[in-house]
């Protein structure tokens, strides 16, 4: 297959765009498209201070690389989850994030969950009903809280994550199967700031397929953690991704069309007024002050108070 | 006349002469979920497999592993 731009040997074929590109032109195309989507969806500008949530994986490091090369002021945030029991997953991930930051002379903020909250994610999960058997729930809750806290307290204009189209389409698929209207109303490439503590959020990679961000990382020579989180095996999101990829194999562009049609439907009013996290519906958490739809404590403070309480009992 | 595919720590074998895409589908591996490489270089999935080639597949799905069929010599 030949590169559409130069006729050279293609290294990737994006069937949904009917576009095959060589290494050189793919490494130009992906950053150009990222910039296009940043502008099209009014994500942020060159004057903004950006905080990139970095996991050490392909998506977040590729995103940080592109934002840096496009000239944005982007600092990184790595959250140490303490998932080290089987293969040192968290320690290795942190190493990839730190090496990338040093190599590119970028600022990386590192927050260790055990240091600030009192336990690692696996230990906390074992002590709460929320995480019994599967730490993904408490992990997601904790990461969202810390990302928001660091972005807000550090006065960053926007918090960006490396979510790609496969992540977004899988979340949409799951939320649609359950008609989770509140989540559907909140799913968006950009979430505006909520005064009082919720940072603005954006997902500049939300229109790229996962294999495109992986190809960028490989071709650009970015070292990223290849192994997966040991708790992710069997996750529902993976199952949804597999189902969507099955559809994509028969109908190229199915995933993209699914997600973009959803965004168009939302723009025309579907799920309007169903967002649970509007300014009017939120209170200040009595412990940390972050906005919450709960009447007293936010889910993060409630969960972690319980973890610390049970640690005391078991000790 | 065989070609080896590796994906994480699994090894698969197929006959030469078919395309990479065809081989992946035969093995039950979703083409969207991997990037095929040959001698360290990315290749497109329309490449015809040659005898004794070794294709290394890079998994691209974040958050877990895919589950290809345990099939050899399709």
Image: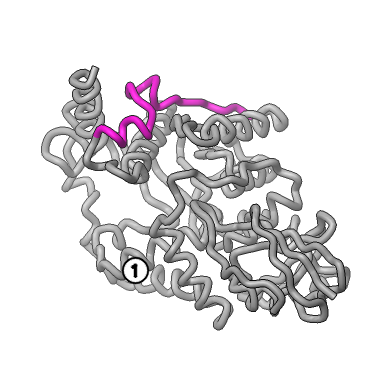
Name the residue: 57% across, 35% down. A93
**A160 inside magenta stretch:** no
Name the residue: 82% across, 80% down. B17
Taking depth in this image into account, of A193 and B13 the one nearest to the observer is B13
Label 1 residue SS: helix
Q: Quadrant of the C terminus of chain B?
A: bottom right
Taking depth in this image into account, of A112 and A145 the one nearest to the observer is A112
Please provide percent x and percent y for residue A194: 30, 42
Please provide percent x and percent y for residue A55: 53, 39
Please provide percent x and percent y for residue A309: 19, 23
Identify the magenta region.
A106-127
**A107 inside magenta stretch:** yes
Which chain is disc 1 placed on?
Answer: A
Is the residue B24 above or below the residue A171 in the image? Answer: below
Name the residue: 81% across, 72% down. B2
Res. A193 visible in picture: yes
């Amino acid at each position: 297959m030949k590169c559409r731009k130069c006729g050279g040997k293609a290294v990737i074929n994006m069937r949904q765009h009917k576009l095959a590109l060589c290494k050189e032109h793919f490494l130009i195309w992906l950053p150009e498209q990222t910039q296009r989507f940043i502008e099209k969806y009014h994500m942020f500008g060159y004057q903004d201070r950006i905080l990139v949530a970095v996991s050490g994986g392909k998506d977040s490091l590729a995103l940080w690389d592109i934002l840096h090369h496009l000239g944005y002021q982007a600092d990184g945030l790595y959250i140490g989850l303490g998932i080290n029991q089987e293969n040192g997953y968290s320690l290795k991930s942190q190493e990839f994030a730190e090496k990338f930051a040093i190599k590119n002379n970028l600022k990386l903020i590192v927050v260790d969950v055990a240091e600030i909250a009192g336990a690692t994610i696996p230990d906390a999960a074992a002590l709460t009903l929320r995480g019994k058997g599967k730490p993904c729930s408490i992990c997601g809750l904790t990461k969202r809280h810390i990302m928001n806290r660091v972005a807000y307290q550090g006065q960053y204009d926007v918090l960006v994550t490396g979510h790609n189209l496969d992540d977004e389409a899988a979340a949409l698929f799951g939320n649609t199967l359950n008609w989770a209207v509140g989540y559907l109303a909140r799913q968006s490439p950009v979430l505006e700031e909520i005064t009082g503590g919720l940072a603005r959020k954006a997902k500049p990679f939300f229109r790229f397929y996962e294999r495109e961000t992986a190809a960028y990382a490989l071709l650009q020579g970015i070292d990223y953690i290849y192994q997966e989180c040991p708790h992710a095996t069997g996750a529902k999101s993976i199952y949804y991704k597999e189902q969507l990829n099955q559809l994509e194999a028969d109908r190229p562009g199915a995933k993209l069309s699914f997600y973009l049609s959803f965004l168009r439907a939302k723009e025309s009013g579907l799920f309007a007024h169903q967002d649970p996290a509007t300014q009017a519906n939120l209170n200040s958490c009595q412990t940390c002050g972050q906005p919450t739809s709960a009447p007293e404590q936010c889910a993060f403070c409630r969960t972690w108070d319980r973890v610390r309480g049970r640690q005391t009992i078991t000790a | 006349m065989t070609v080896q595919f590796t994906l994480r720590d699994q090894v698969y074998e197929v006959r030469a002469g078919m395309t990479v895409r065809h081989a992946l589908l035969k093995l039950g591996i979703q083409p969207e979920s991997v990037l095929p490489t040959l001698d360290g270089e990315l290749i497109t999935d329309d490449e015809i497999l040659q005898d004794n080639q070794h294709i290394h597949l890079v998994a691209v799905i974040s958050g877990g592993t895919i589950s290809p069929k345990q099939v050899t010599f399709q």
